[in-house]
Image: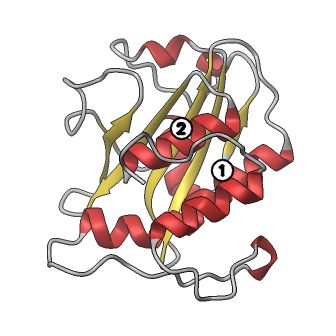
């Protein structure tokens, strides 16, 4: 599922990198769990506390941060040498919410300066809100369950409360964003 969220984020934002952090409920830390840039050695190991760096600030405040240029010079920024994304100019960091609580963060990076439009910020925020419940249940719960069904709160996006699975939510977000490319990698849809 994280790969699909990252893929959709790449499509709708035209970003150069996307990182997904999820909360480790045992420690309360944000842990790098997904990236389209190879970070195999860091997945599951790179951790940030709430309030630490832009990512931790977003988690602590439950509010997105959009830095259009000179992102590494922002006072909240925490440089992590092994992340090439930390040299990129623009950063959009958005909370993933479930049940009113932050369960993760989506970080969108652009190599060059990039002003994040209100629509772009809104779309990535919408994706984070819609995917929060599904992520919480499928990735963070250890008990076996069937795939979660949609509990949509926004009818403006075209959901009537009976969206079905999280894959349908992704399709809905894609349609809302006006994306015409494939949503899922070949063979995963």
Name the residue carrying label 1: 124
Q: Nearer the viewer, residue 124 or 73?
A: 124
| Residue 113 in picture, x, y percent from top left | 75, 16
Name the residue carrying label 2: 107
- 3D distance between C-alphas at marks 1 and 2: 10 Å
Q: How many marks?
A: 2
| Residue 177 in picture, x, y percent from top left | 75, 51
Question: Looking at the figure, which quarter contains the N terminus?
Answer: bottom left
| Residue 58 in picture, x, y percent from top left | 56, 49
Q: Nearer the viewer, residue 176 or 30?
A: 176
Question: Looking at the figure, which quarter contains the C terminus?
Answer: bottom left
- Tell me the SS state at disc 2: strand
- Tell me the SS state at disc 1: helix
The residue at the point 41 percent across, 29 percent down is: 36
Q: Which mark is residue 69?
A: none
The residue at the point 15 percent across, 78 percent down is: 144
């Amino acid at each position: 599922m994280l790969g699909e969220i990252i893929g959709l984020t790449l499509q709708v934002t035209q970003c150069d990198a996307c990182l997904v952090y999820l909360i480790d409920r045992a420690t309360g830390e944000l842990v790098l769990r997904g990236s389209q840039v190879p970070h195999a050695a860091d997945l599951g190991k790179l951790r940030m506390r709430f309030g630490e760096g832009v990512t931790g600030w977003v988690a602590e405040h439950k509010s997105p941060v959009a830095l259009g240029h000179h992102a590494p010079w922002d006072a909240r920024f925490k440089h992590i040498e092994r992340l090439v994304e930390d040299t990129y100019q623009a950063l959009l960091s958005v909370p993933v919410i479930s049940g009113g609580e932050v369960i993760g963060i989506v970080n969108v990076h652009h190599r060059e300066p990039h002003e994040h439009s209100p629509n772009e910020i809104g779309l990535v925020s919408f994706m984070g809100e819609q995917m929060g419940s599904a992520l919480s249940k499928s990735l963070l719960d250890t008990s076996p369950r069937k795939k979660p069904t949609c509990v949509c709160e926004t009818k403006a996006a075209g959901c009537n409360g009976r969206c079905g699975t999280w894959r349908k939510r992704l399709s809905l977000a894609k349609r809302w964003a006006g994306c015409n490319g494939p949503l899922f990698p070949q063979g995963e849809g």
